[in-house]
């Protein structure tokens, strides 16, 4: 059990800055000013800066250690993607996410943790959310309302999807399973208690963005070629098509439409005390077609089913490794961790009652 707690602690520490969004406690969303133009401009200037960086021919740029920076940089594809990552895909809290959360040019509605639908969560069950108390603000993009955390998912996890598909040379299924894995473990259910389908949609739309930088492969949603954002002209990268959030954002980014699932019945009960209403009828099924079942929550606010538990997803990602004994082991570890969480809550409540006695 000590090993389980250590794993939980490491996950919590690494993703302490991850946020959930509460679309249910925002009664005045229709009063928000559309931030599309400001958000488009922020992305556009970052793309411009990424091209400046990618076009440099300097071998000593002091990049992050994880990057590969070749000496010859003109129209070098690896350096182009590295430059985009530096300017748009910061880990944990992305640059555009921070901009949307902090810029005076963006109108947003914010909810304090203690006023949110998650206010009854305790740290053993939702460590990263309770300890950070980070509830993402909501902004308007066109006619849709989006949590600022989704911009981080779009760029950073979108790039992870791009890598999981081997930059679209491989299977889209690999990326979708990777997203389900992260939501079931360290970005969602095991650390916040919340499995967000809206996060999965933002991740997938981010994959579309990274693919469209050079548009060397058909768009994974429309299955058609799209105009690239970047072109190589005279051995230099130049702007091609303009970026626009309306190409990506839709009602499936909204967690009161594409509602989340909760890790346990107890967490679901805590959320339901706020009487949230899930408007699943607004989901854009036609747009996503055959991809919709993996990206949409068809059951509304509910408990995470067995097929979305970590061991089930891992068995699909690595069927050659996940034998039946290993699947049972992973399930046993998860269930033991849940029992530990319950015991911690029981002790906490007992201490609280003892303190309250006259």
Image (cartoon, rainbow, N blue to C red):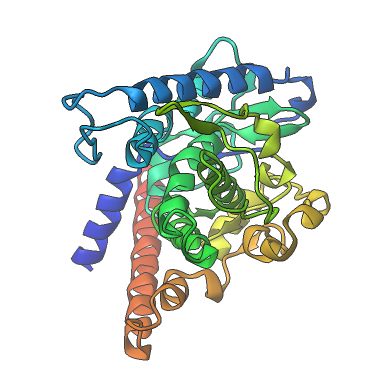
Give the vertical position of 160 relative to 171 (above or below). above
Q: Left or right: where does residue 192 sit relative to residue 295?
A: left
Q: In terms of image quadrants, where is residue 100?
A: top right
Where is residue 332? Give x, y as percent: 35, 79
91 or 13, nearer to the observer: 91
Q: In terms of image quadrants, where is residue 334?
A: bottom left
Where is residue 185? Give x, y as percent: 41, 59
Q: Residue at x 58, y 37 (%)?
A: 228
Give the vertical position of 276 relative to 325 (above or below). above
Q: How many marks?
A: 0
Q: In terms of image quadrants, where is residue 59?
A: top left
Q: Quadrant of the C terminus?
A: top left
Give the vertical position of 45 relative to 294 (above or below). above
Where is residue 259? Give x, y as percent: 67, 52
Give the residue furthest to the top.
104
195 or 154, nearer to the observer: 154
Q: Left or right: where does residue 181 sit relative to residue 225?
A: left
Q: Residue at x 42, y 40 (%)?
A: 18
Q: Quadrant of the N terminus?
A: bottom left
72 or 246, nearer to the observer: 72
Q: Residue at x 38, y 89 (%)?
A: 324
Give the residue furthest to the right.
281
Where is residue 101? Give x, y as percent: 52, 23
Q: Left or right: where does residue 250 sit relative to residue 8?
A: right
213 or 323, nearer to the observer: 213
């Amino acid at each position: 059990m000590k090993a389980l707690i250590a794993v939980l602690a490491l996950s919590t520490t690494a993703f302490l800055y991850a946020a959930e969004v509460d679309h249910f406690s925002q009664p005045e969303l229709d009063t928000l000013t559309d931030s599309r133009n400001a958000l488009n401009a922020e992305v556009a200037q970052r793309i411009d800066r990424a091209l400046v960086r990618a076009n440099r021919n300097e071998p000593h740029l002091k990049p992050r250690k994880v990057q590969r920076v070749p000496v010859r940089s003109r129209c070098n594809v690896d350096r182009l993607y590295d430059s985009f990552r530096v300017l748009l895909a910061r880990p944990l809290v992305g640059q555009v996410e921070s901009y949307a959360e902090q810029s005076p040019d963006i109108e947003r509605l914010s909810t304090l943790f203690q006023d949110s639908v998650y206010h009854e969560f305790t740290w053993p069950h939702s460590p990263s959310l309770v300890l950070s108390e980070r509830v993402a603000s909501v902004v308007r993009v066109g006619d849709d309302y989006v949590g600022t955390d989704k911009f981080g998912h779009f760029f950073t996890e979108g790039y992870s999807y791009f890598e999981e598909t081997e930059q679209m040379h491989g299977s889209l299924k690999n990326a979708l399973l990777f997203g389900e894995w992260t939501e079931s473990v360290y970005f969602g259910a095991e650390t916040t208690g919340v499995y967000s389908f809206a996060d999965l949609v933002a991740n997938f739309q981010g994959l579309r963005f990274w693919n469209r930088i050079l548009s060397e492969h058909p768009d994974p949603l429309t299955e058609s070629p799209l105009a690239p954002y970047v072109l190589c002209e005279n051995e230099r990268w130049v702007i091609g098509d303009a970026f626009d959030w309306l190409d990506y954002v839709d009602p499936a980014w909204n967690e009161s439409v594409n509602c989340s699932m909760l890790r346990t019945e107890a967490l679901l009960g805590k959320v339901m005390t706020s009487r949230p209403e899930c408007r699943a009828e607004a989901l854009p099924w036609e747009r996503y077609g055959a991809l919709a079942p993996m990206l949409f929550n068809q059951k509304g606010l509910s408990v995470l089913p067995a097929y979305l538990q970590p061991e089930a997803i891992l068995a699909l990602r690595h069927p050659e490794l996940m034998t039946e004994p290993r699947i049972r082991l992973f399930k046993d570890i998860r269930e033991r961790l849940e029992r530990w969480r319950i015991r911690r809550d029981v002790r906490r409540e007992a201490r609280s009652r003892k303190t309250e006695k006259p």
